Image (cartoon, helix red, strand yellow):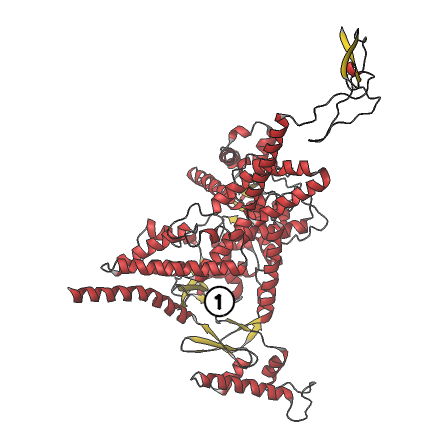
Amino acid sequence: MTTAIDKNSDGLKLKHRYKFPKYPFKYPSPVVCAVGEFPRSDKNEKLYLWNEGKGKAIYRPFETYEQIHQKEREHKAFHDAEALLSKQPKLVQIVVNKRYSDLDKEQGRKRANAYLAKTFVERTYPRIKMITDRYALPAMTVENCNFFNRFNRLPDMSKKDIENLAWDIANLMNEQLMLVGKENITDSELKLTYKLFLHASKITSGFKQDVPRWAKLTTRYFNQKDADSAISRMMSDKWWLNRLRKYASQWREHLSIAINLVSKKANIYASKTAINEWKEQKNRTREFLKSMELEDEEGNRVSLIDKYYGSVANPAIKRTEMMVRIRGFEDICNELGYVGEFYTLTAPSKYHATTKHGYRNRKWNGCSPADTQKYLCKLWSKIRAKLHRKNLRVFGMRVAEPHHDGTPHWHMLLFMLPSQLEEIRSIIKAYTVAEDNHELITDKARKARFYVEEIDPEKGSATGYVAKYISKNVDGYALDGEVDDESGRPMKEAAMAAAAWSGRWNIRQFQFIGGAPVTVYRELRRMADHDRAMGLDVEFALVHDCADSGNWAGYINAQGGPFVKRENLIARLWYQESEDTNEYGEEVIRVKGVFSTLVGIDTPILTRLKQWKIVKKLDDAHAESAFSGANASPRSSVNNCTGETRTINDEEKGVTEILDNFRSIGHEITLEDAKKMRNGSGIVIDDIAFRSFDDGSLIRTGTTQLKYRQFHERKDRIFNKVNKLRGINNESV
């Protein structure tokens, strides 16, 4: 039994008793309302059994204690998330704010606030923090106190800001080394150089940069010459600029991977920013090549861009050469009775930022694509050492290819003896699945980590197995209409993204295993002189003829076979030290030719006879003048055989301006030199290179000798100061 109540003007009053209604009866649906609002019901709505047929129920006009505190907790969590987001790089702020705005428009403010307070704080921020802790300076020290905040803003810096930071760090390095020199006035030059190197290394590593020549100078013997070069690099603003630019770009790209901007849901292989920067760099390079020419000692000029696209820098030539090489390896395999297998090696799941569906991978440890590449290289070094200990020999090729999130994996085409196939396969598999073996509980997982495919001649040649991967990671040749297996994007788009990915993380995409060096092959193709090669040695001539005809298999066999050691090669490169040094005081060693190991290194064949330099390209009028031997081209719109013209006057005026400008700085040059400068050439006076603008004004640039002297001057300032202090101390004694 229960009671029914009736509501009147006097309040609530007991009316009568009645029994519960018999089942079935309907319970009213709950009333949903926002916080701070009260439910409204129609007169006929039956909210509760005890109010059946009697109108509105009684509601509490105020929020409960729990509701108030829940609202306060949500408000505090939202503002804490906002404060945390404001401390992150601009790239992160833009992405998170965009997501917040989209959720606010589509699902309401409450859902957007929940995303910021929970999803960002609990899922996105830990990934960002891993990246920040890796790249940012952890604590303020004496050396970095003036640059702590600036360095930690590298992902947001403009090019000009990075240049200023590099300049300031280089100045700091010079000041600190000067102080070290003053404090160690009694040390010898070698000992002082050692202390300078250690102090410079401490500052450099404090800014999370690799110290040049560190392993060589610390694990072997301390060489004065190498130490001078390393110190000079760490004192150079140019060296710091290159390092900081690379560091900032990789930092931004790593953040893009962390916030899921590099995946099949956004951009495959590389972020949109990295791809755009890669395109811009390609355009700048192309424009530079168009504006410059190569000039030899005799003044002959050739187009720089033609030479560029005629080399392996051209993607089409690069792809063709690799196809020739892998086809040659296949021919050697058939001759020796070897068999081929195709392997796919993948890193464990902790190296992947996203899953195969494009979602965040909770197992990710923050590794970059470069870290994963190092892991695969170390893995292959262990496999190779194991194969060497067991006297198992393989040769072939590997291709480093990115997953959709930028994590690299390897495709390997290896040739081996049929009797050794099972043992080699088991060794490669054992090392590949050793790390995080507990994940490989299904056949699908084991195949994802290590996959092997036997080369079936009926399906195609061994070259055909890697042809697709070569084209995909070079220029997308012959892949029109095909799509990427992982992302579903066109192969042409994937090829561009793969090139940007390789450039951003400095990953070597292609590497041949075994065989002879390809550089020797290219130098031999530059000769194109059979009689000259035959005059040196018969076996050398055979190597040359095979290389000249593009026969990679014959070239490898003539050099000693696919397993030949470097010291047993028939033809090798011949190097020559240049008379000039670079800006860090290092001797420049260049390839000048080839030599036969059977004859000796003292009898080389020079393949590079001319010394070329890059000069500014002549405009059309100047080019025609140079070839015609006149000041202006005949029968033109400005020179129509009508006597003196405006073109001649401008030419003479420019030459006169150059002569006058040189006289103003105390130098006299010949008329011929002035004309050459007018046409874009340069001259060197007292280790200073001069060029001119169109109006005759001069441009001064330092030559290699000048930069080398400036390096020694910077170094000598320290020693001169030390010697001066020594003299003062001796006089006082």
| Residue bearing mark 1 | 607
**Residue 616 in picture, x, y percent from top left:** 55, 73
Q: State the residue at coordinates (41%, 48%).
A: 140
User: What kind of residue is marked 1?
Assistant: Thr
Residue 547 % position (x, y): 53, 59
Residue 56 horizontal/vertical position (percent): 79, 22
Can you say which quadrant of the picture contains the C terminus?
Answer: bottom left
Q: Nearer the viewer, residue 31 or 694?
A: 31
Percent x, y for residue 590? Answer: 44, 64
Which residue is at a point 62% across and 62% down the rendered structure image?
283
Most extreme residue toward the bottom is 643
Quarter location, residue 127: top right
562 and 335: which one is in front?
562
Q: Is residue 548 placed above or below 412 in the rendered structure?
A: below
Q: Which image quarter holds the N terminus?
A: top right
Q: Is residue 568 left or right of residue 350?
A: left
Check the image and name the residue furthest to the front.
10
Q: Is residue 544 left or right of residue 192?
A: right
87 and 577: which is toward the camera: 87
Number of numbered discs overlaid on the protein picture:
1
Give the answer, above or below, for where 348 lies relative to 562: above
Left or right of residue 477, residue 156 in this image: left
Q: Which residue occupies the extreme left position in the image?
A: 733
Classify mark 1: helix, strand or loop: loop
- Residue 298 seen from this side: yes
The answer to whether residue 572 shows anywhere in this view is no
